[in-house]
Image: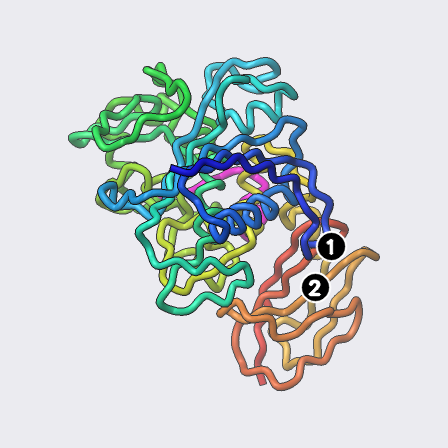
Amino acid sequence: MKQTILLFLAQALCLSAFSQSTFIVTSTGTNPEVDAAIEYATDIWSLYLNSDVPIEINLSYANYSDLGILGQCLPNLRQNFPNAPIEDVWYLTSLANSIAGIDVAPDEVDMDLLINSDANYYFGLDGNTPSNQIDLVTLLLHEIGHGLGFISLGDLADGIGSIGVVPSLPLLPPTSFGFPETFEEHPCTWDLFMVNGTDLLLADAMNFENNSEELGNELVSEDLYYNGATAVSANFGDNPKLYAPTEFFFGSSLLHLDENSFPLSSGNSLMTPFLNFGDVEHNPGSITLGILQDLGWDLNMTVGIADYDEEIFQVYPNPSNGNLTIKLDAIDFDLNLMDLLGNQVADHLVNGQNQLNGLSNGTYIIRGTVDGAFVSKRLVLID
């Protein structure tokens, strides 16, 4: 079987930012088209992440239909490493390395990625994916996202919910690194932000006893959320909803954003659990970036809208008949208008009066950057 070692130094591409991280990908079973998609996906992530330690990936491209997956990320984890912000909490090694400033697992990669070769992929990089194909770049971005932080140690077995207990999964492939034999009932960083609809933290035993039916009920409640401040800010002040269906699915439940709450049109669909034919999302989205920042990643840009309140970023009148005024206390900005299908319908909105012509009544999103921070505001157009 062919094996290639690919060193992907981040490139600027067309995303107008300077990359600060390096990916080293060891791939098995790939071909030039797959390699190009891998390089493109890692380049995109590189643009957002600051890390002095390379992010190392072991990627296998093979037939994994027996696992019933398109892709799967098996992450490496560490706790109590040098400069660890919180004791007895599991961090993915990609994040631990960034925080520590050294490779905390020098002989091991940060994540194993399994990509099922038995699928009808679109290998192009332009996002023009046909409706009968799976966009490979989107899949790769998604799986790498899990290896950067989208992992929960929550599990449900026979009605008993737990956090920090290694599940018994006979179909789980062995990792290329030393996977912990026990999590010692310690949470991972993601679990520190997982709350229910009344904002009760699931990982707090004062709220829910570990290894209990009560905790198990929460894990399948369809009422779980992520409450990190940056992600909440990026979600217009609301806790982003997590995928917690009434039937628990290990590897899907808890560690994704909710599919119905964040459809493709939201711009935040990358880390939802299902990738449909024709779906394309080549941007992590402000909520995903906010989550990574909450988890401890140093990003190349500020995420969220907390600093852009009504005193600093004003849009009026709202609802508007198309004659719209934007008032910004900023010089460096780039704002565009998107419809709810994710289409850009107006670009380069100005600081001052804007006339929006030819648009149907409905809800739109003003989205872009202000002084390097992602911002979003809802806009309603009426006659």
Location of residue 262 with respect to 218 vertically, above or below: below
Picture residue at 50% right of the left edge, 57% below the top: 281
Read off the magenta span. Answer: 224-237
Q: Where is residue 298 in the image (x, y as percent from the top left)?
A: 65, 34
Location of residue 383 with respect to 94 vertically, above or below: below
Q: Is residue 205 left or right of residue 108?
A: left
Picture residue at 41% right of the left edge, 65% below the top: 278
Quadrant position of the C terminus in the picture: bottom right
Location of residue 141 with respect to 347 vertically, above or below: above
Q: How crowded is mark 1: few (under 14 residues within 10 Å), some or many (20 or more)?
A: many
Q: In this view, does 33 lie to the left or right of 347?
A: left
Q: Nearer the viewer, residue 73 or 211?
A: 73
Residue at the outermost left position = 158
What colouring method underlies this structural image? rainbow
- Using the rendered image of the protein, determine whether residue 150 is visible from the camera's viewpoint: no
- Using the rendered image of the protein, determine whether residue 7 is visible from the camera's viewpoint: yes
Q: Quadrant of residue 378?
A: bottom right
Residue 26 is marked as: none
